[in-house]
């Protein structure tokens, strides 16, 4: 018997190797073909996009110009209104002082005096002799009995 050397691979190992190679071939994604469009198509797309964008750019430029003009007008008006605002503030301060005095003191009338003292006789006792009488009806007219 002669010994021949034979390359011996068990069947289960060979079958597994074949299955592994088949899975790699089936599951490996293939690279898609890159289709480069011709230069004319790219230029056409750029022209089409530009035609859509150009009116929007023109609108923006127009609105931006109007905004700058309106901001200049607003700054001019603000500059012209500043002295007038100072006058208004001064007048409001004067009116405020007058309003505070009127609120705190109020107009002194004979009716007010009677209401705060409770009776006409009380007014006579509270007013010092020779005091100026408030405008309106005289206190003596209020202290006379009614007929």
Image: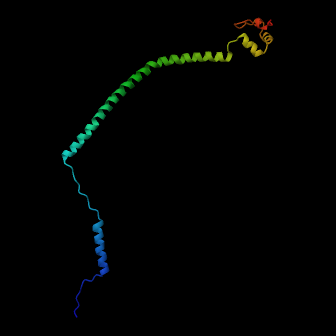
* Screen quadrant of the C terminus: top right
Between 35 and 4, which is closer to the camera in this rendering?
35
Left or right of residue 106: residue 41: left
Q: Residue at x 77, y 15 (%)?
A: 117
The percent coordinates of residue 146 (x first, y second) are 79, 7
Residue found at x 27% / y 83%: 8
x, y percent for residue 113: 74, 13
Residue 139 x/y as whole percent: 76, 7
Colour theme: rainbow
Q: Is residue 31 above or below residue 64?
A: below
Q: Nearer the viewer, residue 147 or 42?
A: 147
**80 up-or-down from 16: above or below:** above
Residue 123 x/y as whole percent: 78, 11
- Determine the residue positioned at 41% across, 23% down: 75
Q: Quadrant of the N terminus?
A: bottom left
Image height check: is 5 above or below 52?
below
Q: What residue occupies the far front of the structure in this picture?
A: 147
> Left or right of 66: which side holds 109?
right
Quadrant assignment, res 2 = bottom left
The total of numbered circles placed on residues is: 0
Residue toward you, 80 or 140: 140
Residue furthest bottom as drawn: 1
């Amino acid at each position: 018997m002669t010994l021949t050397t034979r390359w011996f691979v068990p069947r289960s190992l060979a079958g597994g190797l074949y299955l592994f190679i088949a899975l790699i071939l089936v599951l490996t994604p293939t690279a898609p073909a890159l289709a480069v469009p011709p230069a004319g198509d790219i230029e056409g797309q750029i022209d089409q996009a530009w035609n859509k964008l150009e009116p929007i750019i023109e609108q923006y430029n127009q609105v931006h110009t109007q905004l700058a003009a309106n901001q200049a007008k607003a700054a001019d008006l603000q500059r012209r209104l500043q002295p007038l605002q100072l006058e208004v503030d001064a007048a409001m301060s004067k009116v405020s002082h007058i309003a505070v005095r009127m609120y705190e003191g109020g107009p002194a009338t004979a009716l007010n005096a009677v209401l705060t003292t409770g009776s006409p006789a009380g007014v006579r006792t509270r007013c010092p002799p020779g005091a100026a009488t408030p405008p309106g009806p005289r206190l003596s007219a209020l202290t006379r009995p009614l007929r």
